[in-house]
């Protein structure tokens, strides 16, 4: 069994697309606010704010920001986890003597996704905020109605997280699934040399290009 991601095209109506985009923009603002708070706390007071400490502030933020109160709490928590993963990568590169790349503020154009850490099967949203209907539609906390999904292939395993991503004007959902059966290919006894490039993705030693 392996973990695998399955990406599907969403077909939201105009109102649903607007709600998805509103969630995305709120998440972008929270990411930038969390980055600013963490940066200033260290610069001015020498305090390294933990992810748990910043997540604990979300309850108070929701009181004064109704737009954030409408976004599922686990989505907001995941935004701050994403921020702290960026800092973990920064400190890891500093320790390894590599070019560190301090976490940067994200423009609304570049912040293109948000994640629900739990997925439930059935029409009830329960605690996770995302549910798969029996008719193949997707119910999402904060989005009215049920989203139509183009299931171009079967989804295997158990969906654990659901990431909603905007690419241009299109929306996609990416399910990270556990317990997906591994596809073991039969041995052919043949070998192939592969050269990865920029203009061409890959060139094989028989002269064929991908």
Image: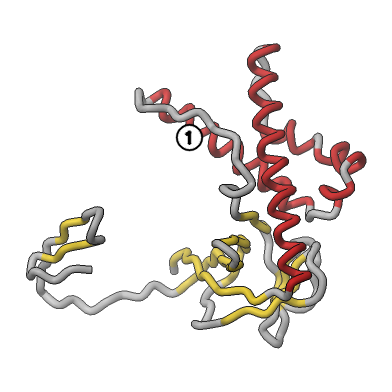
Q: Residue furthest right?
A: 63
- Residue 161 in view of the camera: no
**Residue 99 picture quarter:** top left
Q: Which residue is mark 1?
A: 89
**Residue 92 picture quarter:** top left
Q: Quadrant of the C terminus?
A: bottom left
Q: Which percent across, then down, holds residue 153?
A: 49, 82
- Give the side of residue 144 with respect to residue 161, left or right: right
Q: Is residue 120 above or below residue 81?
A: below
Neighbours of disc 1 within 10 Å: few (<14), some (14-19), many (20+): some
- Residue 8 in view of the camera: yes
Q: Residue furthest left?
A: 206
According to the image, what is the colour scheme of the structure? secondary structure
Q: Is residue 184 above or below residue 201?
A: below
Q: Which percent across, then down, holds residue 112?
A: 59, 54
Q: Quadrant of the N terminus?
A: bottom left
Q: Is residue 86 above or below residue 44?
A: below
Q: Is residue 12 above or below residue 92?
A: below
């Amino acid at each position: 069994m392996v973990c695998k991601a399955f990406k599907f095209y969403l077909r939201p109506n105009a109102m649903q697309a607007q709600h998805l985009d509103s969630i995305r923009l709120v998440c972008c603002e929270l990411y930038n606010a969390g980055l600013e708070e963490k940066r200033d706390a260290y610069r001015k007071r020498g305090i390294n704010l933990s992810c748990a400490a910043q997540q604990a502030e979300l309850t108070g933020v929701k009181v004064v920001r109704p737009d954030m109160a409408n976004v599922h709490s686990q989505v907001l928590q995941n935004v701050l986890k994403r921020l702290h993963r960026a800092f973990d990568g920064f400190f890891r590169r500093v320790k390894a003597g590599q070019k560190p790349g301090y976490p940067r503020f994200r423009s609304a154009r570049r912040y293109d996704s948000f994640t629900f850490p739990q997925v439930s099967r059935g029409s009830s949203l329960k605690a996770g905020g995302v549910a798969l209907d029996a008719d193949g539609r997707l119910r999402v906390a904060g989005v009215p109605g049920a989203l139509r999904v183009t299931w171009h292939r079967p989804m295997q395993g158990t969906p654990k997280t659901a990431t909603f991503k905007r690419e241009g004007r299109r929306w996609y959902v990416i399910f990270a699934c556990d317990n997906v059966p591994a596809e073991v290919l039969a041995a052919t006894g043949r070998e192939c040399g592969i050269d990865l490039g920029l203009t061409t993705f890959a060139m094989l030693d028989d002269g064929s290009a991908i």
